[in-house]
């Protein structure tokens, strides 16, 4: 990279649900801005993470996993991801080291072929496999697409991530600083707070419930003299029966969710946090254009 010039570029992180895209973004930034869970379809919006280095800036775009969408919310999610596959400098196509290429990958690779952008194959979760099995996997994927780079990593342990950053350099053209260098994401604090609450719901609930949850921060009051932020957030669910589960017996579940979320939020904000959660039923909101819009899923 030319040392005289500033370089900047956009790099999307794309792949099937649950392959570790958001974990990778957090690992690159060294800070948690994107939520993660062991359930597919955790991420719903595009999230920009800003990676600064002395001579440049890379804008990484975390995207929802690309899948066959059923329903309006899922269609929104997939649109978010697909739109991050063009007009950028490089795509990181993430796959799992202990999986094999399938129809879901072919679907994404077709989109990438049409967009014509360079694509790096990033084989994630190498902590789960023995190295020889990677060769076969690389061969299988390489037969399907002409990848510009192939980089094995573990987003969880950080193994290979510095090498990945080095491999990206040639794809980052000369360009301006898009964001001030103290900024780490385009997401407002309130949005990340809401996402952190949703993450705890994703992690503690099962079946269809987590997929019908949307969180809104209703108030966010800073009390600098007390080194405290007071936050009220609503957990929106689709049904009365889901509300019961989120509240839990004698309020046990909602208390646990609040405690988990508060720890993450305190870490992010660097202050003490008083977090008040409540649950609201918005019947079948994932199917209503109006309610999707109100909850921030409106393209
Ligand atoms: N063993 C292992 N697990 C990983 C690694 N990277 C991510 N995971 C786990 O994989 C699961 C999914 O991670 P996410 O980062 O939420 O995946 P995602 O691709 O963003 O998923 P969606 O947002 O649903 O598309 C989580 O349980 C992670 O802890 C890795 O390198 N090794
Ligand atoms: Mg994600």
Image (cartoon, rainbow, N blue to C red):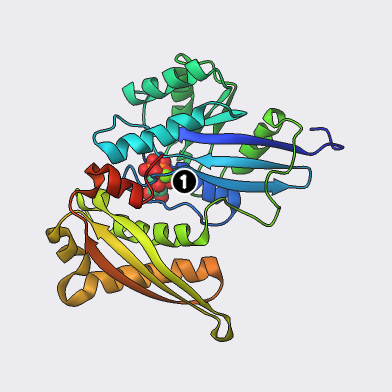
Q: Answer with the quarter of the image where residue 274 lies.
A: bottom left
* Quadrant for the N terminus in the image: top right
Q: Answer with the quarter of the image where residue 65 lies.
A: top left
Please count the marks in the image. Answer: 1
Q: Answer with the quarter of the image where residue 133 lies.
A: top left
Q: Say whether mark 1 is within 8 Å of ligand 2.
A: yes
Seen in the image, is 158 located left or right of residue 73? right
Indicate the position of residue 129 as horizontal and vertical percent values: 43, 37
* Quadrant for the C terminus in the image: top left
Q: Which residue is rendered at x = 75% and y = 35% of the image?
A: 175
> Which is nearer the eye, 81 or 28?
81
Q: Which residue is rendered at x = 83% and y = 36% of the image?
A: 5
Q: Is residue 198 above or below residue 150?
A: below
Q: Residue furthest bottom?
A: 226
Indicate the position of residue 152 as horizontal and vertical percent values: 53, 34
Q: Residue furthest front?
A: 290
Q: Secondary structure at mark 1?
A: helix
Q: Is residue 96 visible?
A: no
Q: Residue furthest left?
A: 241
Indicate the position of residue 58 as horizontal and vertical percent values: 65, 41
Quick one: label 1, few (<14), some, or many (20+) residues within 10 Å?
many
Q: Which residue is mark 1?
A: 22
Q: Is residue 136 above or below residue 173?
A: above
Indicate the position of residue 219 as horizontal and vertical percent values: 42, 70
Q: Which residue is rendered at x = 79% and y = 39% of the image?
A: 6
Question: Which quadrant contains ligand 2?
Answer: top left
Q: Is residue 120 above or below residue 27?
A: above
> Which is nearer the eye, 222 or 39?
222
């Amino acid at each position: 990279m030319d040392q005289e010039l500033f370089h900047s570029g956009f790099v999307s992180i794309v792949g099937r649900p649950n392959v570790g895209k958001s974990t990778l973004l957090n690992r690159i930034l060294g800070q948690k801005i994107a939520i993660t869970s062991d359930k597919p379809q955790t991420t719903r919006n595009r999230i920009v993470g800003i990676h600064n280095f002395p001579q440049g800036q890379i804008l990484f775009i975390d995207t929802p996993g690309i899948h066959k969408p059923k329903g309006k919310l899922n269609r929104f999610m997939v649109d978010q991801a697909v739109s991050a596959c063009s007009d950028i400098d490089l795509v990181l196509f993430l796959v799992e080291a202990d999986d094999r290429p399938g129809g879901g990958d072919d679907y994404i690779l077709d989109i990438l072929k049409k967009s014509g952008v360079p694509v790096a194959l990033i084989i994630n979760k190498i902590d789960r496999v023995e190295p020889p099995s990677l060769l076969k996997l690389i061969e299988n994927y390489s037969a399907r697409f002409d990848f510009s780079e192939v980089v094995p990593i573990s987003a969880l342990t950080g193994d290979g991530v510095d090498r990945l950053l080095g491999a990206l350099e040639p794809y980052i053209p000369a360009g301006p600083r898009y964001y001030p260098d103290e900024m780490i994401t385009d997401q407002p604090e309130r949005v990340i707070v809401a996402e952190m609450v949703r993450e705890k719901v994703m992690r503690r609930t099962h079946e269809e419930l987590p997929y019908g949850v949307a969180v809104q921060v209703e108030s966010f009051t800073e009390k600098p003299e007390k080194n405290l932020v007071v936050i009220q957030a609503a957990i929106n669910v689709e049904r009365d029966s889901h509300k019961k589960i989120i509240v839990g017996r004698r309020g046990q579940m909602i208390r646990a969710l609040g405690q988990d979320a508060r720890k993450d939020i305190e870490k992010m904000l660097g202050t003490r946090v008083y977090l008040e959660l409540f649950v609201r039923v918005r019947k079948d909101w994932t199917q209503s254009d109006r309610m999707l819009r109100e909850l921030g899923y409106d393209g």
